[in-house]
């Protein structure tokens, strides 16, 4: 019975490995379904193999058991080899990173400063209504940070200039009054395209289709309607301001 158990475990490992290789790269739903059906199929095949093993002559059982053990030992040896390769690669990677840091010399401090600056700018831009006009800034900074964190590349002069430009662009945009067509998130969650006036970074207003004050929603990166509009003459003042601009 012990031989049957060992054979069943070895066969299950082999079948599971084959199923895993076959389903790699498929969509998540398809993968989940294949895993489910594969598990059922593995159990059926395992029972069939165990039954065939039990009904085999003793000499043939010894042959099957030996083959299963050899397969197990081969897989264990391959796993150990792969682990050793992984350890060597990790050591080489750390050595290369150390050499890169040494090569950078005085620029190492600037390296960390750029990382912190890029991180700070992402937070600044996410909370700024100027992102209505410049929505791609955060993506570029995130990609730049990812490369910097891997430490596989030294920043370029062009990237330094890009960061300086993005910061200057934000400063300039913060002092402008700009009208643009953009998607606005309504109180009930629906989205409408409206003409919006951005007054620096201090206010977002619209009179499309009626006067309204908006707010910048950093989580959705959209302008959204205030849940409660100001009372009194404030809406009329916004309407008069927009009419005067037109």
Image (cartoon, helix red, strand yellow):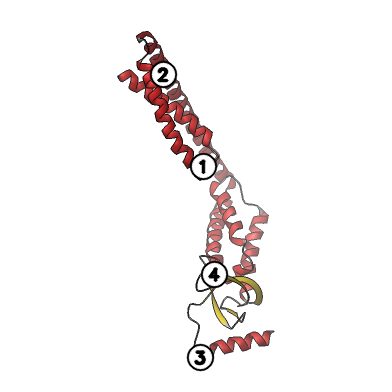
Q: Residue at x 65, y 52 (%)?
A: 156
Q: Horizontal and vertical percent for residue 23?
A: 52, 36
Q: Are marks 3 and 4 in contact (CB under 8 Å)?
A: no
Q: Residue at x 66, y 59 (%)?
A: 161
Q: Earlier in the sequence, mark 1 or mark 3?
A: 1
On the question of residue 58 being in view, the answer is yes
Mark 2: give few (<14), some (14-19) or many (20+) Cα within 10 Å. Answer: many
Q: Nearer the viewer, mark 1 or mark 3?
A: 1
Q: Earlier in the sequence, mark 1 or mark 2?
A: 1
Q: Earlier in the sequence, mark 2 or mark 3?
A: 2
| Gap between marks 1 and 2 measured at Cα | 31 Å
Which corner quadrant of the image does residue 206 belong to? bottom right
Which corner quadrant of the image does residue 185 belong to? bottom right
Q: Earlier in the sequence, mark 2 or mark 4?
A: 2
Q: Are marks 1 and 4 in contact (CB under 8 Å)?
A: no
The residue that disc 1 covers is 30
| Gap between marks 1 and 4 measured at Cα | 32 Å
User: 205 left or right of 79?
Assistant: right
Q: Which mark is residue 190?
A: 4
User: 106 left or right of 38?
Assistant: right
| Gap between marks 2 and 3 measured at Cα | 84 Å
Q: Which mark is residue 232?
A: 3
On the question of residue 106 being in view, the answer is no
The residue that disc 2 covers is 68
Up the image or down, 246 lies above or below 142; here it is below
């Amino acid at each position: 019975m012990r031989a049957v158990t060992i054979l069943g475990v070895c066969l299950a490992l082999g079948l599971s490995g084959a199923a895993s290789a076959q389903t790699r790269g498929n969509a998540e739903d398809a993968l989940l379904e294949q895993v489910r059906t594969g598990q059922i199929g593995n159990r059926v095949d395992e029972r069939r193999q165990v039954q065939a093993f039990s009904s085999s002559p003793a000499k043939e059982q010894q042959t099957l058991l030996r083959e299963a053990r050899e397969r197990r030992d081969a897989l264990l040896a391959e796993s150990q080899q792969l682990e050793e390769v992984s350890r060597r690669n990790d050591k080489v990677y750390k050595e290369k990173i150390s050499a890169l840091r040494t090569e950078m010399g005085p620029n190492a401090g600037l390296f960390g400063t750029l990382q912190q600056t890029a991180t700070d700018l992402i937070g600044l831009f996410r909370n700024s209504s100027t992102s209505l006009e410049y929505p791609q800034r955060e993506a570029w900074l995130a990609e730049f940070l990812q490369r910097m964190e891997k430490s596989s590349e030294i920043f370029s002069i062009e990237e330094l200039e890009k960061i300086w430009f993005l910061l200057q662009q934000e400063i300039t945009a913060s002092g402008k009054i700009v009208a643009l067509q953009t998607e606005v998130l309504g109180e009930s969650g629906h989205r409408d395209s409206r003409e919006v006036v951005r007054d620096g970074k201090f206010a977002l207003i619209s009179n499309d289709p009626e006067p309204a004050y908006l707010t910048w929603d950093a989580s959705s990166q959209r302008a959204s309607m205030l849940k409660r509009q100001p009372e009194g003459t404030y809406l009329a003042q916004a309407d008069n301001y927009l009419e005067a601009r037109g």
